[in-house]
Amino acid sequence: MAAVFYTNKSPFPENKISVVFVLGGPGAGKGTQCAKLVQQKGFVHLSAGDLLRAEQAREGSKYGELIATCIKDGTIVPQEVTLALLKQAILEQFQKGSTRFLVDGFPRKMDQALSFEEQIAKSAFTLFFECPEQVMLARLLERGKTSGRADDNVESIRKRFKTFIDTSMPVVDYFDKQGRVVKVRCDHPVDQVYASVLEALKQRGI
């Protein structure tokens, strides 16, 4: 990966890219639904968590240790790091001709939301996956049997739920007041959830 850069001005011409934020508690099924949209609708899927894990594993990364600590503790990585990685990833894909992006698991905090829209692009809307906590817990524990992820255990999961409610729900509420949130129930079969997602995109002209 090339060196991470960070500037205060959006590198994208106005209205040239479509960004949909994808939010929901840990285990809500964001990745599953994003994968279907990539396959069928030509979106580029950028998972903030995957970008951070890749950066953590990258040899010589100055952020690696910091990211590892945040992931283990279930806390949020400083926004400068996540924003820089997202901006770089979007720019790389935009230069290849991609214009539609699903940004998954971000923004996790209010200041991240504001900084992204100021420095990268204004989001089209936020797709918010609503899911009961017990369903998400069961999914994550099941995933933990094979994922190899350090944070797929009960203690880390509980911390992640609390972090999500305390810091991410205000973001959802903020965008909701602007009429920029589409809520989808995701404790249903995958295809049923996907049908709701497609309907939401259609209503928003995407």
Image (cartoon, helix red, strand yellow):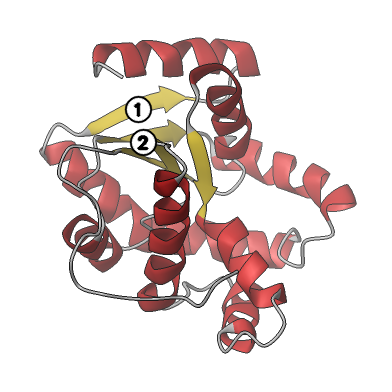
Alpha-carbon span between mark 2 and mark 1 = 23 Å
Please determine whether, in this image, residue 85 is positioned above or below residue 5.
Answer: above
Q: Is residue 180 visible?
A: yes
Q: Position of residue 3 (x, y in %)?
A: 51, 77
Q: Position of residue 73 (x, y in %)?
A: 61, 77
Instruction: Name the residue at 46% across, 66% down.
Output: 85
Q: Mark 1 belongs to which amino acid? A: Lys
Q: Of the residues under marks 2 and 1, which one precedes in the sequence? A: 2
Side of 101 where 174 appears, left or right: left
Q: For this rendering, which residue is in front, 128 or 52?
A: 52
Q: Return the residue at label 2.
A: 99
Q: Residues within 10 Å of mark 1 (few under 14, many from 20)?
A: some
Q: Which residue appears farthest toward the left when viewing the image? A: 178
Q: Return the residue at label 1.
A: 183
Q: Mark 2 belongs to which amino acid? A: Thr
Instruction: Name the residue at 56% across, 42% down.
Output: 133
Q: For this rendering, which residue is in front, 198 or 19?
A: 19
Q: Residues within 10 Å of mark 2 (few under 14, many from 20)?
A: some
Please determine whether, in this image, residue 193 is positioned above or below residue 24.
Answer: above
Instruction: Name the residue at 26% across, 33% down.
Output: 181
Q: Position of residue 148 (x, y in %)?
A: 84, 59
Find out whether the residues at labels 2 and 1 contact each other: C-beta distance under 8 Å. no
Q: Is residue 189 visible?
A: no
Instruction: Name the residue at 60% across, 38% down.
Output: 31
Q: Position of residue 45 (x, y in %)?
A: 52, 40
Q: For this rendering, which residue is in front, 83 or 195?
A: 83
Which disc is residue 137 wearing? Answer: none
